[in-house]
Image (tube, rainbow, N blue to C red):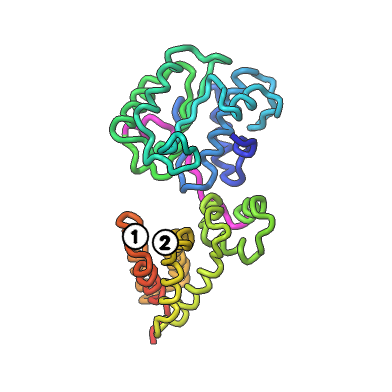
């Protein structure tokens, strides 16, 4: 684990403060659900909070207020090295153990949840506390892994704090949600997004940063996935189509052919994400019939984007169809 992964993320100060207050209360709930859009710092905050929880438990009253833990603290080195006996993190694992950088499994299986049992069968090693993070709890295999976790939440092992990261809490078992205290994380504002992106992409041009902020929609994680994909150019094409209606279909055809190339797969994926949000942005400035037309285009764009991924639809035809929905934003003749 990199040192950066144990640094408090920017944004969501209210959520951070709420958890800090709960930590200081002396009656911290045993299970927390960190919910909000993907890529806004929930998992990173969970790791920072876990480090602080374990460091405080091992060295009571020796740390400064807040979440900082000194660089020489044993808990920091152990977590960073994946060796802390009282810390576990459940995530989706590579499909092929021999290829750690390969594709990830579709879910977190019951075997990973059951692998916690030996730890739960003993008392914590370095203090009276242990922490388990699941990133993301949405990925738990159902029903087996979800039910195995539920049993632990219903009968929590002594001293154990569960930090569950969720991008879609509505998809979780109601019984899991009911046993957690929920902490909501929100998309970041543009100023915070710019600060985060500048830190990761110091060489990026102002135009690229602006385009990534728009495409990221408050999520630095999402925006960084689009880095280097020339999102500004995609926005320029969509802006042209939305302004003119692309009556000859020339712009749509050119874009569809370009994004259908095998080498353009990452840009195609980004385009699927970007079109609905582009249309939504346009809708905010409309009223009456123009607004109705934009909202209809938005609903259709979301449906097409979801189907394109789920059904592996023809890329060229999909791009052409989505660009046609953008064309509906053009002023009526």
Most distant residue in the top direction: 122
- Quarter in which the C terminus is drawn: bottom left
Q: Which residues are magenta?
A: 175-191
Q: Residue 155: percent from the left, percent from the top?
A: 37, 19
Q: Is residue 89 visible?
A: yes
Q: Nearer the viewer, residue 275 or 192?
A: 275
Relative to the observer, which residue lies in front, 160 or 271? 271
Please name the residue that numbered disc 2 is placed on: 272
Furthest-left residue in this view: 143
Q: Decide which of 329, 125 is in the foreground and name it.
A: 125
**Quarter of the image where the N terminus is located:** top right
Residue drawn at (68%, 24%) of the image = 73
Does the magenta-highlighted stretch encompass residue 146? no
Kindly identify the residue that appears in the image at 56 percent across and 45 percent down: 12
> Which label's residue is closer to the chain start, 1 or 2?
2
Pinpoint residue 311: horizontal percent, then vertical percent: 30, 57
Q: Residue at x 33, y 31 (%)?
A: 146
Q: Is residue 29 visible?
A: no
**In the picture provided, is 1 more to the left or to the right than 134?**
right
Residue hosting label 1: 308
Q: Position of residue 15 (x, y in %)?
A: 54, 40
- Residue 315, picture quadrant: bottom left
Give the quadrant of residue 74: top right
- Mark 1 vs 2: CB contact within 8 A: yes
Mark 2: give few (<14), some (14-19) or many (20+) Cα within 10 Å: many
């Amino acid at each position: 684990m990199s040192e950066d992964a144990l640094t408090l993320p920017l944004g969501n100060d209210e959520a951070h403060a709420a958890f800090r207050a709960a930590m200081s209360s002396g009656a911290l709930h045993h299970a927390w659900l960190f919910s909000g859009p993907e890529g806004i710092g929930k998992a990173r905050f969970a790791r920072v909070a876990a480090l602080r929880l374990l460091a405080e438990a091992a060295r009571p009253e020796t740390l400064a207020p807040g979440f900082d833990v000194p660089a020489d603290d044993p808990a920091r080195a152990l977590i960073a090295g994946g060796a802390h006996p009282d810390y576990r993190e459940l995530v989706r694992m590579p499909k092929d153990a021999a290829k750690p950088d390969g594709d990830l499994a579709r879910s977190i299986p019951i075997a990973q949840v059951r692998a916690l049992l030996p730890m739960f069968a003993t008392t914590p090693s370095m203090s009276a506390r242990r922490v388990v993070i699941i990133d993301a709890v949405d990925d738990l295999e159902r029903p087996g892994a979800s039910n195995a976790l539920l049993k632990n939440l219903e009968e929590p092992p002594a001293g154990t704090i569960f930090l569950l990261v969720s991008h879609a809490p509505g998809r979780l078992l109601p019984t899991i949600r009911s046993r957690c205290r929920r902490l909501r994380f929100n998309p970041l504002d543009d100023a915070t997004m710019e600060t985060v992106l500048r830190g990761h992409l110091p060489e990026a041009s102002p135009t690229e940063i602006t385009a990534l902020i728009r495409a990221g929609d408050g999520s630095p994680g999402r925006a960084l996935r689009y880095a280097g994909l020339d999102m500004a150019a995609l926005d320029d094409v969509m802006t042209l189509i939305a302004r003119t209606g692309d009556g000859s279909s020339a712009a749509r055809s050119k874009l569809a052919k370009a994004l259908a190339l095998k080498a353009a797969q990452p840009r195609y994926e980004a385009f699927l994400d970007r079109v609905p949000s582009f249309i939504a942005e346009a809708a905010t400035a409309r009223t009456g019939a123009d607004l109705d037309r934009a909202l209809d285009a938005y609903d259709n764009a979301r449906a097409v984007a979801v189907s394109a991924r789920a059904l592996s639809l023809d890329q060229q035809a999909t791009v052409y169809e989505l660009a046609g929905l953008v064309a509906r934003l053009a002023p009526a003749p």
